Amino acid sequence: MNPQLTRRHFIKGVIFSASAAASGAGYYIASAASRSPGAVERLISLNVNGRVRRVDVLPQETLAHTLRYRLNLTGTKLACNRGECGACTVMLDDIANYSCSVLTHQVKDRAVITVEGLRAEDGTLHPVQQAFIEELSPQCGFCTPGQVVAAAALLRANPNPTREEARQGLSGNLCRCGAYDHYLNGVMRAAELMA
Amino acid sequence: MPSHDVMPDMELYQPVQVEDALALAARLGERGWLLGGGQDTYGWLKDRAKRAEALIDLNGIAALRGISETADGIEIGALTSLTEIATSPLINQRYGVLAAAAGRVASPQIRNAGTLGGNVSQDVRCWYYRRGLDCYRAGGNLCYADTPEGMNREHAIFGQSRCVAASPSDTAPALVALDASMVIRSENGERVMPAADYFVGPAIDIRNTTALRTGEILTAVRIPSTWANASFYFEKVADRNVWDFALVSIAVAMKLNGDTISDSRFVAGAVECKPRRLLDVEAAVRGKPRDAATAQSLGDLASRGARTLAHNQYKVPLLNNLVRRALHIA
Ligand SMILES: Cc1cc2nc3c(=O)[nH]c(=O)nc-3n(C[C@H](O)[C@H](O)[C@H](O)COP(=O)(O)OP(=O)(O)OC[C@H]3O[C@@H](n4cnc5c(N)ncnc54)[C@H](O)[C@@H]3O)c2cc1C
Ligand code: SF4
Ligand code: FES
Ligand code: FES
């Protein structure tokens, strides 16, 4: 293996070749389709984590794909890719959305915040991140970025939730490890930290 | 790095005027696909079970969003999100059954993106059909679900006609209960039809769940004042409280005159391919008090005439019990 390769790039390469091999017709390599009149321009500006970034986006591309594979923001996870797990949760204008189930072209005028964009400029963790550490919320950690963003969005809308409200707020995020109560403890502590 | 995405190659249009969207829908015809929140759409496209050459994204059309009061009730733009409906003070105050139904759809994130127009226009959730099999609904000549070994636990107990799929929408029964009407536009003009006629079963049209035709866009849903501030009940039973579709749901509106029910709407979801109005139940409770005795007197009236499949007999007692509960809980 090329020692230059980072672990991240190595993993990505493996994922790509495995998916291409395993799924056959299931995956398409999107081609640069010729544009028809009135259709969207591919080169767009996106406001991600407070920075405006120019990026070349296919018409049908999902936001999760753009974030991970064009902007290298791999904190956003892709698991089910069909709106059934929450691992890909990001904030669009402060509202939690599944980035696997929104087109990048639909968020041109919206502020996208991913898990990478939650901590402060000086590196201080977001209260949700801090509270999740203190409460040992994650187990394996795979669902954690989605849980963090969903919790942050919940607290923006409702800074002082009851435990039941927090449960509802995080109900669109699956955790295969079943660490739900630990995440809820984290949300309740985060609300205290923010008070 | 090569770009691999599960989304197939498609063109995308983002009109900001209804007129432009209508022109696109007319021009593209069967090749186009209207896009609301996309929460039903992406599954079809990612699975390659249905295809489109171009998406017509309606989200940029401000005129299709929002909840407003009218001379006789309210009007909800078709692109209004389910979260906005579930949390709207106006809808919670006057038409609580709709807020409750919208709040039970899927998950918070799906309600944030999903629209009312998409929710009432979504396709059925039959496993076989969604896998892209060439069943009746897909234009073929057999049903994979209505067989002794078929997975038909979620399917219909009424109104089957070759296809036995059940209505997936949580808001649909609430809209029928509220006597809502659907505002539909095309390049040729506007037509308004009762929600009860918007939803169609396989005996009328086996390929479509609604009366919408190619080139038409649902622009708004109107709710008359008829049932404003009535007594409401909504309950959805599903395997999980989040994500899962209703196994059976019930949306009820009742007008009480003193202690007795003067008029009512009882509408069940997921028992037929469209919301099922329980006319016999409505007739039986007229003039009766809303109490346990009335509930008991109904017996199995709600489920009379049901034709169950191999694995969905449980829907019969479930439907009967939900109807009773709507009367019990004051
Ligand atoms: C994991 C998961 C769980 C779900 N659970 C539930 C559930 O519990 N209850 C439930 O009711 N639904 C559920 N859904 C289904 C559905 O995604 C949502 O109901 C959502 O409301 C659909 O709305 P949308 O705007 O996202 O639809 P879209 O996907 O945008 O549209 C759905 C269909 O309607 C058409 N359409 C959209 N808007 C219009 C319009 N204005 N005029 C004409 N046609 C239009 C589209 O062309 C498409 O065919 C679930 C979906 C997923 C992925
Ligand atoms: S129930 Fe309807 S959608 Fe399902 S396999 Fe049968 S015909 Fe197709
Ligand atoms: S990856 Fe988006 S919800 Fe699972
Ligand atoms: S911590 Fe493992 S999936 Fe949630």
Image (cartoon, rainbow, N blue to C red):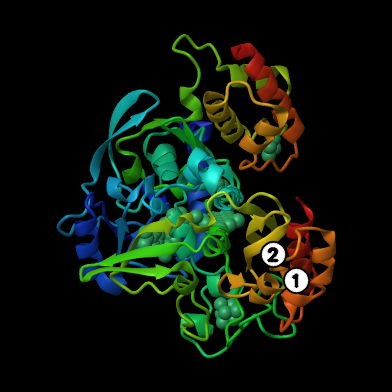
Judge from the rendering whether residue B136 lies leftward or rightward of residue B312; answer left or right: left
Residue denoted by label 1:
B315
Residue denoted by label 2:
B247
SS for callout 2: loop
Assess mark 1: CB under 8 A from ligand 2?
A: no
- Residue B317: x and y in percent read 80, 70
- Residue A14 is at least partly visible in this image: no
Please tell me which of labels 1 and 2 falls first in the chain.
2
- Residue A165: x and y in percent read 66, 32
Task: Tell which of A15 and B12 is nearer to you.
Answer: B12
- Residue A10: x and y in percent read 51, 39
* Tag 1 and tag 2 share a subunit: yes
Q: Are marks 1 and 2 in contact (CB under 8 Å)?
A: yes
- Residue B197 is at least partly visible in this image: yes
Judge from the rendering whether residue B248 lies leftward or rightward of residue B82; answer left or right: right
Task: Tell which of B53 and A8 is nearer to you.
Answer: B53
